[in-house]
Amino acid sequence: MTKLLELQGVSKTYGKNTVALSEINFSVNEGEFVSVIGPSGAGKSTLLRCINRMIDSTSGEINFDGQAVQKLNKKALRQFRTKIGMIFQHYNLVDRLTVFENVLHGRLGYKSTLAGAFGFYTDEEKRQALELLSILGLESQVYKRCDQLSGGQKQRVGIARALVQKPKLLLCDEPIASLDPNASKVIMDYLQTICKSMGITVMVNLHQVDVALKYSDRVIGISKGEVVYQGDPRFMKEEEIHHIYGSEAGELIFNLSEESHYVG
Ligand SMILES: Nc1ncnc2c1ncn2[C@@H]1O[C@H](COP(=O)(O)OP(=O)(O)O)[C@@H](O)[C@H]1O
Ligand SMILES: [Mg+2]
């Protein structure tokens, strides 16, 4: 197994005393589907943002694809960012633009500012954007404005925009938190396909334990900025879920024992 990502003693403090991450250690192998679970405020978003350097960690080391992430200069950082796609809870699309234009934005990291500003895309880039939209079941939405789409469709546009970048790693920050159960399942199934058929490593922040257990090769549990669990979801015990979620856990475990949409 090839290691794609490794974090060693990574900490992040906002301002003077908000410790969001404290001495985080873990690694992710190529092709793995990893979920990060934990209550609100645990540090999940901070963790993903440190990995792709949307924000700078305070200390520790992050290694991605053989590169020391925190040491990249401006030019290397641009190139590095093309290798990591990201999708968000609120999609982060440009609503007044078309689906097609939003997806092509995924290519901006490869272009000069000028070419990007004028919307110069090659025929090959356009072909790839259309192919991804078709894989994601959006062929009839290509020329629609994004504000006319449902949440589930918007998230699929977000996925297509991330994939057109040809990333090695896809980071997903609460990708289903704004979606109903049916749309959530569609999105999670696509993420699984992207990982297992396209070979792209997927790391997803989730609030829902049942979803994490169903889809992941490995679960990383964080609580108050610390990794408190790492392992195969099949062997995860109730008390470990309790440990991650603290007082929120009762309700979550109750949901798990219900006829869940995801489990089974
Ligand atoms: N930009 C920021 N400035 C200051 N504090 C922040 C910022 N972003 C997050 N935090 C704090 O860091 C901690 C972790 O937040 P976050 O990474 O958003 O957690 P999660 O995604 O698990 O809900 C929380 O205490 C939060 O209030
Ligand atoms: Mg978050």
Image: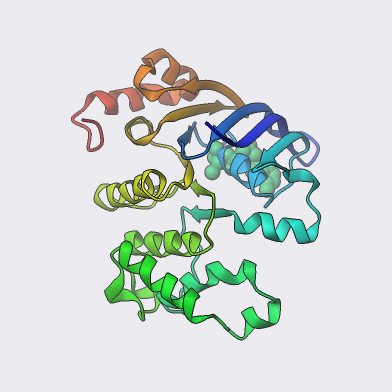
Residue in the picture at 51% in, 20% down: 229
Q: Is residue 90 above or below residue 111?
A: above
Name the image quarter holding the C terminus. Answer: top left
Question: What kind of colouring is applied to the model shown?
Answer: rainbow
Q: Measuring 43% from the left and 70% from the top, which residue is drawn there?
A: 128
Residue reaching furthest to the front: 1
Image location (x, y in percent) of residue 13: 74, 36
Please state the horizontal and vertical placement of residue 79, each as a whole percent of the image: 68, 59
Q: Nearer the viewer, residue 199 or 229?
A: 199
**Residue 140 vs residue 30: left or right?**
left
Q: Residue furthest bottom?
A: 118
Give the quarter of the image for residue 105.
bottom right
Give the side of residue 139 with respect to residue 75, left or right.
left
**How many numbered callouts?**
0
Q: Position of residue 45 (x, y in %)?
A: 57, 43
Residue 145 left/right relative to 87: left
Above or below, comparing residue 41 to residue 198 in the picture: above
260 or 122, which lies in front? 122
Report ligand 2 position as a quadrant.
top right
In this view, 49 is above or below 252:
below
Residue located at (64% from left, 49% from top): 52
Q: Nearer the viewer, residue 167 or 249?
A: 167
Q: Position of residue 114 (x, y in %)?
A: 69, 82
For the point 59% across and 30% down, the residue is 27
